[in-house]
Amino acid sequence: MDSRIERINQAAEYISSRLEGRKPIAGIICGSGLGNLAEKITDATVIPYTEIPGFPVSTVIGHKGNLITGQLGGKCVLAMQGRFHYYEGYAMEAVTMPVRVMKKLGIEYLFVSNAAGGLNPGYAVGDTVVIRDHINLMPNPLIGANMDDFGPRFPDMTCPYDLELQDRADAIAQSLGHSLKRGIYIAGTGPTYETPAEVRYFRAIGGDLIGMSTVPEVIVARHSGIRVFGMSVVTNVANTENVERNFNDGEDVVMQANKAAQWMSVLFEKMVELL
C-alpha cells in the first residue's frame, strides 16, 4: 500500500476511536487567531495533534494545535485549532494530510478561515471577505503519484469555492445586519511578508487578499470531492511604497484576527446548521 495512504488511515483510525460513533459532516480549519471558533463546539472531545499518529505539529503564533470534535449548529463537526504551513518546513503532503484524514472520517464540507493582507484598496483592517477564487503561487499539493482513492489525476478547479455556500453566507450575513465582501486570495509560500513591489504585482494580476495558507488544503479538498467555503479576515493593509510605515507584525495579525472571531463564529455556526 502507498505509504501516504497508510499514514492517513492510521491517523483516521485513531481519531475514529475517539469519536464514539459520531459521523462528522463538516471540517473547519481555523487560521491565525481564529482558533476560538472551535470553542463554540459543544459536547466536545479535544485531541492534541501530538496524540494523532503521523500528524504534524503546528508551530505558529495563534495556532493551538488541537483537533476538536463535537456539535456545532446541531451537526457533528471536526475543527482544527491551527493548521500547518509550507513555510514551517513541512512537505505539502503533511500540510494537507488533515484534509484527507477528515475525508476518510466522512466530511462532505470544508470551512476554511485565515488572516490575510488586504491588497484591494477598498479593504480595511477587520473586514471579513468571502474567498470566491484563488491564485496559487505555492507548489501544487497534488504533484507526485496521484492518490486514486481520493480523486482523479487532473481535478477540475472551475469552482474551487462552492457558489451555493457563498450565496448562503451572504444571506445569513444580511439577516444579521452585516455585509460581506468577496475577493480573490493569493497564496504565497511566506514566511516573509510581501514587498511593496510584490504587492503592486499581486494587485495587477487580480488579487484582493494575500496570505500563506489555505489554497493547498482547498486543492486537496476539491480533489477529494469536498465542497469548500473560505473566508479571510483582513488583518493588515498591504504596503505599496518603500517607506518606513505600515510594517507587518505577526502578533498584531493575531490580535486583529481575534477581533473578528466572534462574528465569524456566528456565521460559520449558522452555515453549518443549514447543511
Image: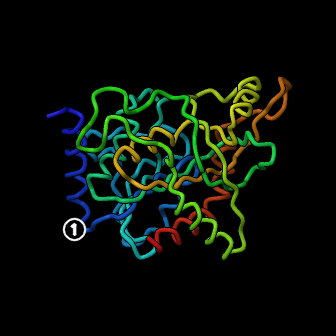
Mark 1 belongs to which amino acid?
Gly
Q: Is residue 175 above or below residue 80?
A: below
Foreground: 119 or 155? 155
Would you call the spot at circle 1 few (<14 residues within 10 Å), some (14-19), or many (20 or more)?
few
Can you name the residue that lies furthest to the left here?
Answer: 1
Left/right of residue 221 with respect to residue 125 in the rendered view? left
Image-quadrant location for residue 2 = top left
In the rendered image, the quadrant that contains the C terminus is: bottom left
Which SS class for mark 1?
Answer: loop
Q: In the image, residue 1 lies at what x, y percent?
A: 13, 34
Residue at image mark 1: 21
Image-quadrant location for residue 189 = top right
Left/right of residue 241 with respect to residue 158 in the rendered view? right
Q: Residue at x 69, y 43 (%)?
A: 252
Q: Residue at x 40, y 29 (%)?
A: 90
Q: Residue at x 71, y 68 (%)?
A: 178
Q: In the image, residue 258 lies at what x, y percent?
A: 63, 55
Q: Is residue 160 above or below residue 264?
A: above
